[in-house]
Image: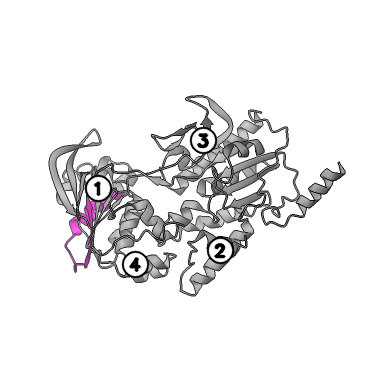
Amino acid sequence: MGLNLLNLCRRGLHTSPARLQVIQNVTPTKRICIVGAGPAGFYAAQLLLKQLSDCVVDVVEKLPVPFGLVRFGVAPDHPEVKNVINTFTKTAEHPRLRYFGNVALGTDVSLKELRERYHAVLLTYGADQDRELELENEQQGNVMSARKFVAWYNGLPGAENLAPDLSGRDVTIVGQGNVAVDVARMLLSPLDALKVTDTTEYALEALSRSQVERVHLVGRRGPLQAAFTIKELREMLKLPNVDTRWRTDDFSGVDSLVEKLQRPRKRLTELMLKSLKEQGRGSAGSKQFLPIFLRAPKAINPREMEFSVTELKDDSAVATDSTERLPSDLILRSIGYKSSCVDSGINFDTRRGRVHNTEGRALKDVDKIDPGLYVAGWLGTGPTGVILTTMSGAFAVAKSICDDIATNVLDTTSAKPGYDADDKRVVTWDGWRRIDEFESNAGKAKGKPREKIVSIEEMLRVAGV
């Protein structure tokens, strides 16, 4: 016993930052691990800490830095959306939460190990892959995903070497969601407007040399099915020196249907019709934003893309025999994200790109719940909705965890040890604070909110691990 006590004391004297994360004033009887420090993870942690007074929540994140899609997905010129980071920071600084950055599930720790060390594990590591067009020549250099382009200008580690070719006049974006519109806006915005955002310095330099003058935004279906929202469209219509050009034929019969639409769709459609009616008035801009409806990708050719003309049947796009070719020096696909399976212990739906689950409870097989394993965010639902949608879903799954504990579906009578960082290079919340301060100071010198570190090694150095 004396030897064991001596070993325990030695372990207690270990000076790694991860070991110094001490949970004070609580004897935890429930340990919950959240894998992924994005919106779903933080919203779930917020509710769990509020509802369970005797629980400890550990957040494990693959990258050294937190906030996931808010940091690496939200457009740099939408700082108001990033204000949610203040809420996440308050949750992270809760005395019963520990942050373990630079710890990758499936590489640094297995799901089996986490499940042995926690009463419940919640997977919220998001969607890191994109759906492909499945066309010949899709892998050529001038075709890339909008997801990677967003990661490039937002400073996701590993994306800094993307080097999109912006030397041509025409960019074709396949897809009409908000991500697609974000990308179009970044390509057409005045550089001075982006210089005061947290757009990475290398992206600003590349955009300063851009020769892009026209951005085609192409969708399979019609204006009434457009996936972008009114906020994003308004921003495009207000861009200085940019003309938005609609095709009159795309709106045939649309105005007669407006009154029957639900309010959000009605307002969006009215704005498109208003813009269509007003186009051509005033002085022409040197750049053009060109939304095009009822076109389905058919072929990728040198410097152009071929589309099938489509017709709507029961709200679905059906290809006709007619085709159209668009000049396309750069092609960006934006037709959806999907998640990846990072651990063999996850029952993963490869077709849909998400974890098999029922209302956030992970499944062992087709319809059998796997007690103690949960999933939230895009990893569980697929890439749908905005941050508020993710919040509602994460709250619901966190409540399910609380309910399962209250009804003894989960056995919390025996103590669990939680994650043991050993001698791994783990970034604690204090380490993140050092990175945050470093980035903020670097940005301040350039008149920006921050200049993001894009090298993981540099992040670890600044964090002191």
Work out how far the residue at label 2 is from the one at label 3, CA to CA, in angstroms.
34 Å
Instruction: Please tell me whether residue 239 belongs to the stretch shown in magenta.
Output: no
| Nearest to the observer: residue 249 or residue 292 | 292
- Residue, x 52% and y 39% (percent of image)? 343
Where residue 226 appears, as percent x and y from the top left, is 28, 46
- Are circles 3 and 1 on residues that touch, CB within 8 Å? no
Q: Which residue is mark 1?
A: 137
Marks 4, 3: nearer the viewer: 3
> Label 2 neighbourhood size at 10 Å, few (<14), some (14-19), many (20+)?
many
Amino acid type, callout 4: Ala
Q: If you read the primary sequence from the N terminus, does the residue marked by circle 2 or circle 3 appear first? A: 3
Amino acid type, callout 3: Ser
> Which type of secondary structure does the marked residue at label 3 adopt?
loop
- Residue, x 22% and y 63% (percent of image)? 169
Numbered range of the magenta stretch: 268-294
| Nearest to the observer: residue 183 or residue 115 | 115
Q: If you read the primary sequence from the N terminus, does the residue marked by circle 3 or circle 1 appear first? A: 1
> Which type of secondary structure does the marked residue at label 1 adopt?
loop
Work out how far the residue at label 1 is from the one at label 2, CA to CA, in angstroms.
41 Å
Left or right, 249 with respect to 267, comes to left
Q: Which residue is mark 3?
A: 344
Where residue 36 appears, as percent x and y from the top left, is 54, 47
Marks 2, 3: nearer the viewer: 3
Q: Which residue is mark 2?
A: 436
Q: If you read the primary sequence from the N terminus, does the residue marked by circle 4 or circle 1 appear first? A: 1
Depicted 113 relative to depicted 82: above or below = above
Q: Which residue is mark 4?
A: 206
Left or right, 277 with respect to 240, comes to left
